[in-house]
Image (cartoon, rainbow, N blue to C red):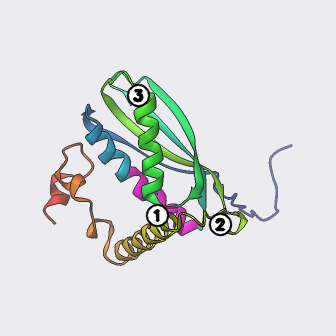
């Protein structure tokens, strides 16, 4: 009754239920190109974290806040489940194009990978008439794993997308740009 307990503390870590990344931009995003740059940036980190945990996401969720901080949140299945940043970004961008039809300026975007699964628990049906899709996914996966290794060794700024470097949406600060 007094809250005294001599038993040892054993922290139990639950497995992650989602992996997300959000960003409030330097200025409101008004063009689809600016939104795509932001979504690509956010999705890169999500893919990297999923690969590090050995998980794939079966659902992508997108949260958008406008200039007045009104928000919408939508999600879409990721089929097949993936840990490839490009595929997560494509799904998130598709949600944005379908759901943000009124073209209001966007202040913040959050991309979240949910319904996480272990790859060994997945059964993927491969289409024998479209082998290039599987090969393309493998190339994307190897590319992103290579980028992960370079960033792990030399730091996150070792490889940056050109579109991010040329944008002024606040992802990279001017001091980072000069390194």
The residue where tag 3 is placed is 100
Segment colored magenta: 42-53
Quadrant of the image for the C terminus?
Answer: bottom left
x, y (%) of residue 110?
A: 44, 41
Q: Is residue 52 magenta?
A: yes
> In the image, is 170 to the left or to the right of 78?
left
The residue where tag 1 is placed is 48
Front: mark 1 or 2: 2
Q: Residue at x 30, y 47 (%)?
A: 37
How many labels sit on residues? Answer: 3
Main secondary structure found in the magenta portion: helix
Q: Residue at x 32, y 71 (%)?
A: 155
What distance separates the C-alpha of mark 3 from that of mark 1?
27 Å
Disc 1 residue crowd, few under 14, some 14–19, many 20+, Cα 10 Å: some
Q: Residue at x 59, y 52 (%)?
A: 79
> In the image, is 119 to the left or to the right of 3?
left
What distance separates the C-alpha of mark 3 from that of mark 2?
32 Å
């Amino acid at each position: 009754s007094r809250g005294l307990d001599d038993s040892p503390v054993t922290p139990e870590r639950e497995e992650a239920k989602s992996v997300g990344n959000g960003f409030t931009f330097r200025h409101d995003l008004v063009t689809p190109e600016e939104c795509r740059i932001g979504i690509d940036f956010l999705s890169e980190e999500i893919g990297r974290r999923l690969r590090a945990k050995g998980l794939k996401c079966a659902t992508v969720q997108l949260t958008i806040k406008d200039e007045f901080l009104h928000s919408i949140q939508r999600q879409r299945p990721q089929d097949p489940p993936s840990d490839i940043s490009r595929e997560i970004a494509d799904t998130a961008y598709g949600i944005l194009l379908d759901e943000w039809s009124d073209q209001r300026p966007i202040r913040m975007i959050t991309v979240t990978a949910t319904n996480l699964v272990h790859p060994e628990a997945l059964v993927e049906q491969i289409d024998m008439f479209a082998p290039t899709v599987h090969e393309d996914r493998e190339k994307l996966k190897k590319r992103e794993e290579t980028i992960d290794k370079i960033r792990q060794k030399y730091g996150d700024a070792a490889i940056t997308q050109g579109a991010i470097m040329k944008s002024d949406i606040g992802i990279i600060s001017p001091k980072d740009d000069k390194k």
